[in-house]
Amino acid sequence: MSSKFHSYFVNALTFSRVPLIFAFMVSAILAHHLNHAGYAIAACVLLTLSGFSDLFDGKLARKWQVVSTFGKLADPLMDKVFFIVSFPTLLWLISAQGDNAFHAGA
């Protein structure tokens, strides 16, 4: 495969983090409000896929030797979006548990 394809693939992997993490947020909120296990499973899968996209985009860029200045700037930006969305969502989910037996104060 060509170097151009590898570069496009790595950049697409980097930018896939944003829709994945927003889909995680929506799935997590729906899982809480609708009390539906399917949404909770989807949220876990989406969060995991978003993490794996972060893991593999840099590894593949170095392996295929398509490291670019654009990628060096885009990856930390996507990381910030990941953390700005995921941590507040997770904290909200924890606080919304109320008197659940799994709550930290129980």
Image (tube, rainbow, N blue to C red):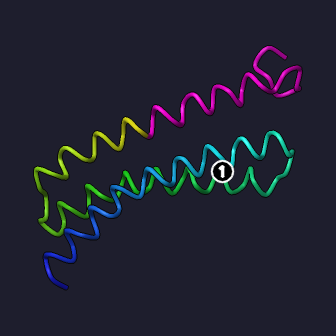
The quadrant where residue 59 appears: bottom left
Q: Residue beneath label 1, please? A: 43
Residue 85: in magenta span: yes
Q: Where is residue 67 drawn, in percent x and y?
A: 13, 58
Q: Quadrant of the C terminus?
A: top right
Q: Residue at x 54, y 53 (%)?
A: 48
Q: Residue at x 79, y 14 (%)?
A: 105
> Which span is picked out in magenta?
82-106
Residue 83 vs residue 33, the one in the foreground = 33
Q: In this picture, is 10 found above or below 81?
A: below
Name, please, the residue furthest toward the bottom: 1
The quadrant where residue 4 appears: bottom left
Residue 65: in magenta span: no
User: For the residue labelled by badge 1, is the local secondary structure a helix, a strand or a loop?
Assistant: helix
Label count reads 1
Q: In this picture, is 79 found above or below 20?
A: above
Q: Where is residue 62 drawn, in percent x and y?
A: 17, 60
Q: Residue at x 19, y 43 (%)?
A: 73
Instruction: Indicate the amino acid at tag 1.
Output: Ala
Residue 64 vs residue 13, the one in the foreground = 13
In the rendered structure, the answer to whether residue 75 lies left or right of residue 67 reads right
In the rendered structure, the answer to whether residue 86 lies left or right of residue 94 reads left
Q: Count residues near mark 1 (Cα–Cα under 10 Å), then give few for <14, some for 14-19, many for 20+.
A: many
Q: Where is residue 56 drawn, in percent x and y?
A: 34, 59
Q: Residue at x 48, y 54 (%)?
A: 19
Q: Quadrant of the N terminus?
A: bottom left
Q: Where is residue 79 drawn, in percent x and y?
A: 36, 40
Q: In this picture, is 65 found above or below 47?
A: below
